[in-house]
C-alpha cells in the first residue's frame, strides 16, 4: 500500500517552509513540527503564540505507538485566589451576531506552548534545540506577510486583537492590516533568541517567568511563581475508533471526536449518509469563533507529529519588549467549569490525530482549528479521504456543513442532493454565501498528498 510522503501542512506558507527546512536538514517529524509551531508564533499571531497552549499527537513508525501530549493552559491561583472581575468584556461579531468574550489580565491562564514544544523535542527530536528554533527567530527579525484569510480573521477578532498594545501592531494608524501587508512584532526576535539559548524554562523559572508574573498581575490577573514552577506537560490516554477499515487515534477532546467517529452511520454512501452524519456531529453548544492553528508533519521514516495550539482570542496583555500576547482562555465562557481548581488543565476542543491503515502503517496525520467546529472539519476531511476516495487537498477544500441543535450550517456549493436528504429528515438549513473560516482550518499529510485549508490560507509542502 502507498506510504505517506514526507511533508508539512500548515496555515501559513512561512510556517510550512520552516517545517520543511528542518526536514531537509535531517530533522524528525517532531523537530519539524516544533519548528513550524514556533514559526506559527511569529506568522500566525492572530491564531496562536508562545503565550498559549496546545496538544500534540505523535506516531512512531517503528513501534506503531501513538502518544498524545497535553500542554494546554492551566488554571492559575496556586499563589493567591483568582479574581475574574478584572476581565474586560468585548463583542466579537461572527456570522452577523455578537459573541461576548472576556480578555485582560484575569483571563490569562498558565501558558503551555514553550513547555510543550520543549517536551516534544526532548522525546522525539534529533537536531539541536537552537537549530529547531532558528527558522522562527529569522522570521521574527523580518516579519511576515499577512495572508488574506488571516486578515479576515483579524477583522472578526479586532476588538480583542487590536486592544491595548495590539492596536499599534494590528491596526496601525487606525486601519486594520490587510492581506499581503507586513505583520511584525517588535521584540519577538529577542524572545526567540532567549528561547533558543536558555530553553523553554526561560518562560517558567527563568527571567521571562518573573516578567510574565509581574505583567499579568499588573493587568489584574493572578499567575504566580508556584503556577509557573509547577507546570508540567502531561501524557494523556489515546482513544481509538474505526472508520472504513482504518483506525483513528486521538485524545478525548471536549467534543469527543473519536466517539463521534464511532457513532457515524454504517452506510456512508452519499447522499443518504448526510442526516446520520449530522446526527453524530450535532453540537448543542454555542457557536464560538476561536483562534487556533494546526501543523501536521510526516518525516521520511514515516513518523508523524501533529500539533494544535491556540491563544483563545488573546488577552491583549503583552510581555513588555517581547512581542508576545498572552492567552485569554479564562475568558472563554464555554471552556469554564464551576470547579476551576488551581493547577488543573482547562478543557479544549483541539484534537490532533493520526490514522493508521489495516497494515498498521500511517495513512493520515491531521488536525484542525475552529473551536467547536474542529470535530466537524476533521470528520468531513476523513470521510473525504478514507470513504470518498478524494486526495487530501480536495477533501479539505470541499464545502462542509456544521450541525447546531436542529440546524445545519452549510458552505456555498454543498451538494443539493445531501441538502435534500437533510431537509427531508427535518433539519433546518442555513446556507452561507462562501467558503468561510468559521468551518475550521484543517491541515493534513496523507497517502494522497498534503494540504492546508484554503479557509485559513493554508499550504501543504512535500519533501
Image (tube, grey):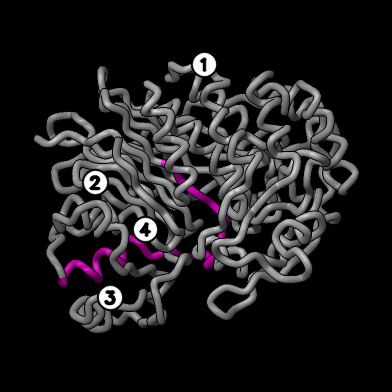
Residue 289, visible in the rendered structure: no
* Relative horizontal placement of residue 180, taking residue 185 as reference (left or right): left
Nearer the viewer's eye, disc 2 or disc 4?
Answer: 2
Q: Is residue 65 above or below residue 247?
A: above
Cα distance between the residues tagged 1 and 3:
47 Å
Label 2 Cα neighbours within 10 Å, binned few <14 / some 14-19 / many ≥20: many
Q: Which residue is mark 2?
A: 449
Q: Nearer the viewer, residue 306 or 425?
A: 306
Cα distance between the residues tagged 2 and 4:
17 Å
Cα distance between the residues tagged 4 and 1:
35 Å
Label 1 Cα neighbours within 10 Å, binned few <14 / some 14-19 / many ≥20: few
Q: Residue at x 78, y 28 (%)?
A: 209
* Magenta region, residue range: 271-295
* Mark sitting earlier along the chain (2/1): 1
Which percent across, then down, holds residue 117?
54, 29
Would you say residue 284 sits in the magenta stretch? yes
| Residue positioned most to the right | 218
Q: Residue at x 78, y 25 (%)?
A: 226
Residue 128 numbered tag: 1
Q: Quadrant of residue 64?
A: top left
Q: Which residue is mark 3?
A: 414
Q: Nearer the viewer, residue 6 or 124?
A: 6
Q: Is residue 362 above or below residue 92?
A: above
Residue 377 numbered tag: 4
Label 3 Cα neighbours within 10 Å, binned few <14 / some 14-19 / many ≥20: some
Secondary structure at numbered mark 2: strand
* Relative horizontal placement of residue 410, taking residue 89 as reference (left or right): left
Which percent across, then down, holds residue 93?
62, 74
Q: Residue at x 34, y 78 (%)?
A: 412
Amino acid at each position: 500500500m502507498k506510504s505517506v510522503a514526507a511533508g508539512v501542512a500548515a496555515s501559513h506558507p512561512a510556517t510550512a517552509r520552516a517545517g520543511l527546512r528542518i526536514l531537509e536538514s535531517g530533522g524528525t517529524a517532531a523537530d519539524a513540527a516544533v519548528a513550524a509551531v514556533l514559526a506559527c508564533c511569529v506568522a500566525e499571531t492572530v491564531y496562536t503564540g508562545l503565550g498559549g497552549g496546545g496538544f500534540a499527537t505523535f506516531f512512531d513508525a517503528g513501534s506503531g505507538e501513538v502518544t498524545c501530549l497535553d500542554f494546554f493552559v492551566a488554571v492559575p491561583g496556586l499563589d493567591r485566589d483568582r479574581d475574574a472581575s478584572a476581565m474586560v468584556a468585548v463583542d466579537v461579531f461572527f456570522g452577523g451576531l455578537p459573541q461576548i468574550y472576556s480578555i485582560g489580565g484575569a483571563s490569562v491562564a498558565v501558558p503551555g506552548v514553550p513547555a510543550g514544544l520543549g517536551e516534544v523535542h526532548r522525546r522525539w527530536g534529533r537536531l539541536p534545540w537552537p537549530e529547531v528554533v532558528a527558522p522562527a527567530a529569522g522570521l521574527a527579525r523580518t516579519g511576515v506577510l499577512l495572508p488574506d484569510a488571516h486578515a479576515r480573521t483579524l477583522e472578526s477578532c479586532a476588538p480583542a486583537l487590536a486592544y491595548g498594545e495590539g492596536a499599534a501592531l494590528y491596526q496601525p494608524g487606525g486601519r486594520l492590516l490587510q492581506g499581503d501587508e507586513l505583520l511584525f512584532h517588535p521584540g519577538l526576535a529577542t524572545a526567540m533568541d532567549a528561547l533558543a539559548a536558555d530553553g523553554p524554562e526561560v518562560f517558567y523559572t527563568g527571567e521571562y517567568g518573573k516578567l510574565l508574573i509581574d505583567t499579568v498581575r499588573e493587568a489584574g490577573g493572578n499567575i504566580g511563581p508556584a503556577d509557573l514552577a509547577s507546570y508540567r506537560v502531561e501524557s494523556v490516554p489515546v482513544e481509538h475508533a474505526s472508520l472504513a477499515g482504518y483506525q483513528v487515534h486521538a485524545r478525548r477532546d471536549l467534543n469527543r471526536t473519536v466517539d463521534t467517529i464511532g457513532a457515524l452511520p454504517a452506510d456512508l454512501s452519499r447522499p443518504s449518509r448526510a442526516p446520520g452524519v449530522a446526527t453524530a456531529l450535532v453540537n448543542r453548544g454555542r457557536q464560538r469563533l476561536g483562534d487556533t492553528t494546526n501543523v501536521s508533519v510526516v518525516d521520511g521514516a514515516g513518523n508523524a507529529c501533529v500539533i494544535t495550539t491556540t491563544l483563545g482570542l488573546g488577552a491583549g496583555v503583552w510581555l513588555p519588549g517581547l512581542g508576545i500576547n498572552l492567552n485569554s482562555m479564562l475568558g472563554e465562557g464555554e471552556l469554564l467549569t464551576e470547579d476551576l481548581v488551581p493547577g488543573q488543565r482547562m478543557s479544549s476542543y483541539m484534537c490532533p490525530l493520526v490514522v493508521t491503515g489495516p497494515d498498521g502503517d500511517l495513512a493520515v496525520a491531521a488536525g484542525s482549528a475552529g473551536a467547536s467546529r474542529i470535530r466537524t472539519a476533521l470528520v468531513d476531511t476523513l470521510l473525504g479521504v478514507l470513504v470518498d476516495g478524494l486526495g487530501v487537498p480536495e477533501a479539505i477544500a470541499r464545502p462542509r456543513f456544521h450541525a447546531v441543535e436542529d440546524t445545519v450550517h452549510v458552505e456555498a456549493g454543498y451538494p443539493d442532493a445531501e441538502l435534500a436528504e437533510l431537509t427531508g429528515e427535518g433539519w433546518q438549513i442555513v446556507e452561507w454565501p462562501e467558503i468561510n473560516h468559521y468551518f475550521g482550518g484543517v491541515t493534513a499529510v496523507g497517502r494522497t498528498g498534503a494540504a492546508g485549508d484554503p479557509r485559513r490560507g493554508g499550504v501543504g509542502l512535500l519533501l
